[in-house]
Amino acid sequence: MTATLLASAASVQAAIPSPSQHTWYLGPVPLRAYALAILAGIVVAVWITTRRWVARGGDPDDVLDIAFWAVPFGIVGGRIYHVISTPEPYWGSGGDPVRALYIWEGGLGIWGAVALGAVGAWIGCRRKGVRLSSFADALAPGLLVAQAIGRLGNWFNQELFGAPTTLPWGLEVSPEVIERLNAQTGTSFAAGTLFHPTFLYELLWNLGAAALLVWLDRRYRLGHGRVFWAYVALYTLGRVWIEMLRIDTAEHVLGLRLNVWTSIVVGLGALVAFVVIGRRHPGREDGVELPGRSRDRQGEDRRPGDDRDGTAPGSPAGTENDTEPDTELDTTSTAHAGAAAGAPGRDDGRDSGGGPHRADAGGPGPDQGPADRA
């Protein structure tokens, strides 16, 4: 009896089961696991980025304002890249172009999401008067954590898994998914075949890379976009070998999947950018504001020549590189107080300190909006 039980146990292969359901209904409203994973990733990324942004000297409200632009741009860009890199389900034989709009079915290409999301973030940063490079450095670890959480959506959808495996952590998928895979790829996998859980590989890789980024940033005080370029280099390094395990339909170039080539090219570019920026700017920037722009205590964007804080045009108090703003303001206040009290002296706009009454001071400049270049 014991020998029979041991033999039966040995014949049962360990596996990671796939969820039996990926959509739940709240009345007529569908709650899809993929969408919930993406939303959860965004929330966690915003929380992590806010903490890091404040530690770098930024206003916590900036993160939500910038995310308002970056998230929609990123989702659209991610979907466009996915449809381009995996066109068969939409424009191939038996494909349905309308399904390209069905984001809830899964399919967001990270490179499109990062590229177009960066455009949205740039718009948001320009509107807030802060550096895109500083924001990208604060965002990078949280972005990796968001990607890790988002991969759970692939698990629920039973998609984007790797080649067959006999490893004890092989992924078990439903017979219907195997049948659909065979029809799409021309394979003949039998029901019960286990596959590499590439969603899990990327999830663990992303979390490890996020922890490494945080350590590198604290240890070497990286700035000027170097944390972000390190994120790109680390992510692409893992994506290359994980992508080569996958067997879903994709565009191929010179025998390799398009995403593999993209990872190689982008990863090498990120490594070059990391080294070059490190040589030019070895430390971290002094502040997160754009050069020549600062903000008052309420976080309002202010440019040189703007007298909304009570300072006349031309005062150095509105510039980012002012090293002793309190001294200048105190001197000006003293001179005005003396003039008001009838004290000897003159206030003819030619004071040596370059105070607020310099004759060559320019008037308030127009409030320029963000440039419209991508």
Image: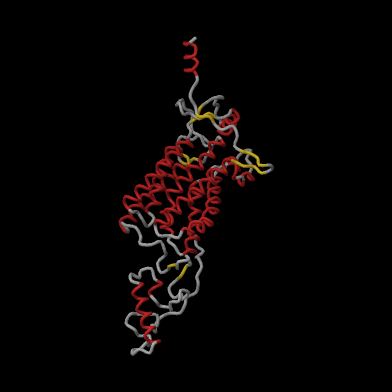
Q: Is residue 194 above or below residue 65?
A: above
Q: How is the image coloured?
A: secondary structure
Query: x, y (%) of residue 314?
Result: 40, 78
Q: Is residue 183 above or below residue 151?
A: above
Q: Is residue 162 visible?
A: yes
Q: Given the current orientation, which residue lies at the most extreme front position?
A: 341
Q: How many marks?
A: 0
Q: Quadrant of residue 330?
A: bottom left
Q: Is residue 288 above or below residue 162?
A: below
Q: Quadrant of residue 241?
A: top left
Q: Is residue 91 visible?
A: no
344 vs 77, left or right, is left
Q: Quadrant of residue 210?
A: top left
Query: x, y (%) of residue 111?
Result: 48, 48
Seen from the viewer's position, the closer of residues 168 and 340 is 340
- Residue that appears at 38% across and 79% down: 333
82 vs 334, left or right, is right
Q: Given the current orientation, which residue lies at the most extreme top position?
A: 1
Query: x, y (%) of residue 370?
Result: 50, 65
Query: x, y (%) of residue 46?
Result: 49, 51
- Residue that appears at 43% across and 73% down: 304
